[in-house]
Amino acid sequence: MAFEEVKNKLGFGCMRLKMVDDKVDYDEFNRMIDAFIGEGFNYFDTAHGYIDGKSETAIRDCLVSRYKREDYILADKLSEWYFEKEEDILPLFESQLKLCGVEYFDFYLFHCMTGASYPKHKNCHSFQIVEQLKKEGKIKHIAMSFHDTADVLDMILTEQPSIEAVQLQFNYLDYDDPGVQSKACYDVAVKHGKKVIVMEPVRGGFLANLPEKAAKVFDELKGGSYASYALRYAASFPEVFMVLSGMGSMDMMNDNINTFKNFVPLNKEELRATDSAREIIREVIQVPCTKCNYCTEVCPKNIPIPELFVSYNKVMSAKITVGEGKSALPTDKGAATDCIKCGKCEGVCPQKIEIKRHIEKIANW
């Protein structure tokens, strides 16, 4: 399998774009796109629900309308929470093409696949539908983003050989985590001859804003930003062909471009530093939320769950008081006390967080 169209390992994840008044900041996005493509990068990643649907249209308005189709690689996804039956899939796909303003996707991924969601895809024949779309030229490559155990991944790849690449949560914090199983899933993908796309290499920004003790480990190396070490860690694995970064500002973009323009894998000393940082972080981390916002997409009470967890983590690590944590929470959305414990959020959480339990703690502040 060859993905020669992809020019570099750095991919632009369009899930955390800069917002102004609940709208994507098009001026900033345009500048970021121009810098990204201008430096020789070309892979863009989106999904139907990113930023409440604004990611796809922002790509249409800021990328597709301003560049030739051969100038960029575009990946989109089939999310199981946007279809109920087989007949829903093709209209959803066609709407995604229209929203993005393109006639085909370079990569189309089965989104957030788990052992629980896999039967729905099989029952709705989504694999056969996507394979047919590839035959028709509307998809170039079939892939899958995956959030479950290595044995589940092994089963799916055995049953669905048309999948060409697997998108995995992969970073130095989750590498040997028994819940995420980054290394074990990577090994399964390699066993099946699949290339790996990395998501959450900086773990939702957490590995760019380290606890003080962990930060000192990298400060002593004097070799770049904390985010650069995380990105280089992921990109150092041989079967990783793409590392997605959810860049929300030009500062992030410039730092990431500098990291990948003259990419150098981590050396032994730097790898030891990631091992040390991992152990330090695990001593202080509270709720391992990556702010993917899948939970907010299904919450019937519009509770901004990731924002609650940001405040919760700061309170629990004694960075702010409970009062400051309360005042930092948004007032125009649902509150923790509105939670009806329906569990929909936990059903889509890639990190398998006990969301209801933590929200109850916040509700009792």
Image: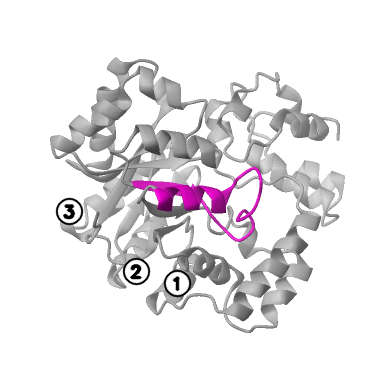
- Distance from disc 3 to disc 2, alpha carbons, whole Å, reads 17 Å
Q: First in sequence, mark 3 or 2: give its number.
A: 2
Magenta residues span 165-191
- At which x and y percent is residue 30? 34, 59
Give the residue at mark 3: 69
Mark sitting on residue 297: none
- Dividing the picture into quadrants, the one containing residue 54 is top left
Q: Which SS class for mark 3? A: helix
Q: Is residue 267 left or right of residue 35?
A: right
Task: Tell me which amino acid carries mark 1.
Answer: Asn
Q: Residues within 10 Å of mark 3 (few under 14, many from 20)?
A: some
Q: First in sequence, mark 1 or 2: give its number.
A: 2
Quadrant of the drawing holding the N terminus: bottom left
Q: Residue at x 45, y 66 (%)?
A: 253
Task: Tell me which amino acid carries mark 3.
Answer: Arg
Give the residue at mark 2: 35
Give the residue at mark 1: 254
Q: Which SS class for mark 1? A: helix
Q: Is residue 340 above or below residue 204?
A: above
Label 3–label 1 contact, CB within 8 A: no
Q: Which SS class for mark 2? A: helix
Q: First in sequence, mark 3 or 1: give its number.
A: 3
Front: mark 3 or 2: 3
Q: Is residue 3 above or below residue 252?
A: above
